[in-house]
Image: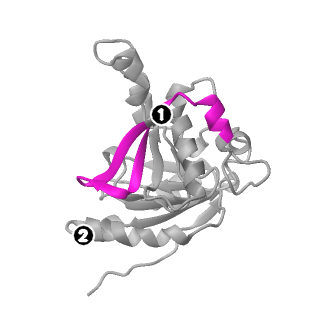
Amino acid sequence: MAPTIGGEIERVDGRDLTYEEFVERYMKPNLPVVLTGLTDTWRSRTDWVDNSDPTRPNLSFFSSLCSSSVVQVADCNKKEYSEQKRVEMTVADFVRSWVEDSSNQPESCRYLKDWHFVKEFPNYCAYSTPTFFMDDWLNIYLDSHALHRDTDICPHQNEANCADYRFVYMGPKGTWTPLHADVFRSYSWSANVCGKKHWLLLPPSQSHLLLHRCMSWRRRCCVCRDLKLRLLLLVFVENGSSGQAFSCECLNF
C-alpha cells in the first residue's frame, strides 16, 4: 500500500504558548510546529527588509555591512557528487549577481548557505532566541570548544567558518535545498525574516522509503519554485530518538 502524503502542521501564536505546553505538545510527541509572532521585535526584521517593499530583502544592507565576508554559495541548477555545486564568493559579489540575475535569464540559481553570521558579527544582535529554544546544547558546546583558543587547531582566519550552527540563508525565488536531515540529527528551528519558505517534511516512520529515492525527491522539490507569497514564521523540526525528520526546503522572495 502506498504511503499517505499530506497532512497539516499546526500553527500556533508563540506568544500565547508556555514552555511547558511546548514540551508536552510538540517536543515529547516529536512533532513539528509553526510558531508565529516571535520575530516582531528582531533587529533583522527592520534592517534586512526593504522599507519600500516589505516582501523583498534589503540587499544594500548586506552589501554595506558584510561586503567582504566570504560565504558558501550553492548553484541549485548544478550537481556535484550528491550535493549542489558550491563556490566561495564575497557577499558583495553574491548580492551583485542576485541583482543582475533578476533582470536576465541566468543559467545559475545561486543560494547563499550556512553563513556563520552570528560568529562573524557577534556585536550585531540580529535576533533573540525564543525561550523554547534556549537549551541549545550543540552551540553551547561549540562556543567553548578548543578551536577558539588553539590556533593550531583552527587558524584565526578560518574560525568563523567552522564555529557553530547558527546560520543565515539567502536566495532569490526558485532557490532550494535538497532532501536532508539536520546536523547530527539534532532538534532545530528556523525563522523566516523575509519571503516565503516552503517545507516538505517526512515523518520518521516513512524515512525508510527514501533510501534509494533521494534524487527523485529532490527533483520533485522544484515545484516550490512558483511560490511568491510572503510569510514570517518560525518552524521547529523535531529529530527524536525514534528516527529522523527529513526536510526539503525552498526559499522564495
| Residues in magenta, as a range | 60-88
Q: Quarter-wise, where is residue 77 in the image?
A: bottom left
Q: Quarter-wise, where is residue 218 in the image?
A: bottom left
Foreground residue among 130 and 77: 77
Give the SS element for disc 2: loop
Q: Position of residue 136 (x, y in %)?
A: 47, 37
Residue at the far bottom: name it: 1
Earlier-in-chain disc, 1 versus 2: 1
Q: Quadrant of the N terminus?
A: bottom left
Residue at the far front: name it: 104
User: Horizontally, is 20 left or right of 108 in the view?
Assistant: right
Foreground residue among 139 and 83: 83
Q: Position of residue 35 (x, y in %)?
A: 61, 57
Residue position marked by numbered label 2 in the rendering: 213
Residue at the far right: name it: 52
- Residue 74 included in the magenta stretch of the image: yes
Q: Quadrant of the C terminus?
A: bottom right
Q: Which residue is at 40% across, 29% downward?
A: 161
Q: Which residue is at 78% across, 48% downward?
A: 51
- Residue 218 included in the magenta stretch of the image: no
Q: Which residue is at 79% across, 51% downward?
A: 52
Amino acid type assigned to the residue bearing label 2 in the image: Arg
User: Horizontally, is 4 left or right of 17 in the view?
Assistant: left
Amino acid type assigned to the residue bearing label 1 in the image: His
- Real-space Cα distance between discs 1 and 2? 31 Å
Foreground residue among 198 and 25: 198
Up-down relation of residue 160 to residue 78 (above or below): above
Foreground residue among 222 and 217: 222
From where the camera sits, is residue 237 visible? yes
